[in-house]
Amino acid sequence: MQATQPFPDVDAVVIGTSAGGVDALLCLLPALPATFRRAVLVVIHLPPDPSTGLVTVLADRCVLPVSEALDKQPVLPGEIVVAPPNYHLLVEPSRTLALSVDPPVCFSRPAIDPLFESAAIAWGPRLLALLLTGGSEDGSEGLAAVRARGGQAWVQDPSTAVARTMPASGLQRAGADAVLTLTQMAERLARG
């Protein structure tokens, strides 16, 4: 039933994940068609080593362009931008990106909460947040901020997550507009 619902009328999609997140992203992001006209911003908890190769792996599998975020970069529709290792990724109210070396959140930098919270201010009800598999509570406060400003939240069904702590915590703290498997999310995104 949920899979037949229309894609929300949003300008941006923010995605947060941790343990099991690379596989989750490889399920979701390649599903985005060339006609997907929303900005996509991604935070995944990774070690601070800049040679993770994640952007290359994603770019090889996605039809949309994939890049690592740069400070003061404008947010553009139809592009996937990934937080660089060891920097928080934020969205300015002017919808440009900012990189921060503020202290880790839930032991992580980049962390999901700063992205979700700042994006909620920038886009309000025209934001969709996806909280996926992960082993910490990062993302819960950010998800609450998105919903408080009228944005929508999709949370991975914790029973299908490699690490259920993150989606379960998000649901407990903020609830969700939809609780979906990765396959269901990918199908919905493909229609966006």
Image: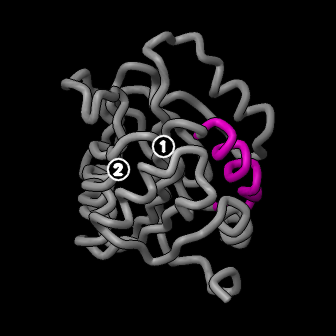
Front position among marks 1 and 2: 1
The residue to which callout 2 is attached is 139
Q: Earlier in the sequence, mark 1 or mark 2?
A: 1
Name the image quarter holding the N terminus: bottom right
- Please give the name of the residue rendered at 63% of the width and 84% of the height, measured from the top-left corner: 2
Within the image, what quadrant is residue 109 found in?
Answer: top left
Give the x, y percent position of residue 132: 52, 52
**Gap in Å between the C-alphas at discs 1 and 2?**
10 Å
Task: Give the left or right position of residue 64, taking residue 131 as reference.
Answer: right
Residue 150 drawn above or below residue 32:
below
Name the image quarter holding the C terminus: bottom right
Give the magenta range: 21-36
- Please give the name of the residue rendered at 53% of the width and 59% of the height, measured from the top-left corner: 158
Task: Give the left or right position of residue 48, taking residue 150 as reference.
Answer: right
Q: Residues within 10 Å of mark 1 (few under 14, many from 20)?
A: many
The residue to which callout 1 is attached is 134
Task: Give the left or right position of residue 70, taking residue 180 as reference.
Answer: left
Q: Secondary structure at mark 2?
A: loop
Question: Among all residues in the image, which is located at the extreme left?
Answer: 103
Asked if residue 76 can be seen in this view, the reply is no
Task: Give the left or right position of residue 150, taking residue 19 as reference.
Answer: left
Residue 148 drawn above or below residue 141:
below
- Please give the name of the residue rendered at 53% of the width and 72% of the height, measured from the top-left corner: 179
Give the x, y percent position of residue 105: 25, 34
Q: Are marks 1 and 2 in contact (CB under 8 Å)?
A: yes
Q: Tell me which secondary structure the magenta stretch mostly adopts.
A: helix
Instruction: Tell me which amino acid carries mark 2.
Output: Gly
Asked if residue 36 can be seen in this view, the reply is yes
Give the x, y percent position of residue 127: 41, 65
Instruction: Tell me which amino acid carries mark 1.
Output: Gly
Q: Residues within 10 Å of mark 2 (few under 14, many from 20)?
A: many
